[in-house]
Image (cartoon, rainbow, N blue to C red):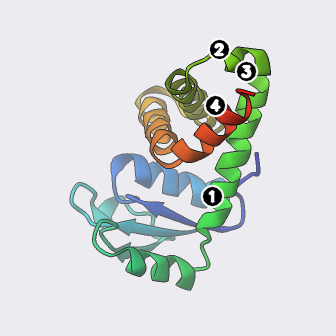
Amino acid sequence: MRQIVNTNVCVIGGAGFIGSHLVDYLIDERNCNVIVLDNLITGQTKNINSKAKFIWHDIRDNENELSRILKENNIHLKRREYIMKKKLDSIIQNNFNDEELKFTPFEHFRLHISDYVGTEMANELNLTGDKKVTFRNQIIQYVRNYFYEYLKEVWESKQN
């Protein structure tokens, strides 16, 4: 997986407990320029690393505004999707053979893949305890919600 280092990163929810720790890690350990987007419903400005750029924004309000903010700060979502698809492909290749996939129902496959990804990414970040559990669960939900079609396409290609 591509290392996130010396790049522009956006952390949505970066004023909350988990997000602020991720921001600190990206700035202190990975030398990233971090943009924090948060609506401050549960997060607090005191949690935000002073080296991060903070923008108040509720991502539920206006998708065009979010796109504008990301574009202005040179943050590309396609890169994130590409990296996640490469991660999914690697996990599928290393954990499922074609014969197994022929007999695995799609929902079972989708749930297992998202669990693998969440666990592996939390381990790669060396997270522990509650931070690891929360991060892992967020990645699992992200994969299950945003990569359904991609996983369905991969699964269907193995059914022939």
Q: Residues within 10 Å of mark 2 (few under 14, many from 20)?
A: few
The residue under label 2 is 103
Give residue 44's position: percent from left, percent from top.
27, 60
- Determine the CA span between mark 2 and mark 1: 31 Å
User: Tag 2's secondary structure?
Assistant: loop
The residue under label 1 is 80
- Determine the CA span between mark 4 and mark 3: 15 Å
User: Tag 1's secondary structure?
Assistant: helix
The amino acid marked with disc number 4 is Glu
Left or right? Give the position of 26 relative to 49. right
Quadrant of the image occupied by residue 125: top right
The residue under label 3 is 96
- Determine the CA span between mark 4 and mark 2: 25 Å
Q: Residues within 10 Å of mark 1 (few under 14, many from 20)?
A: few
The residue under label 4 is 120
- Determine the CA span between mark 3 and mark 2: 11 Å
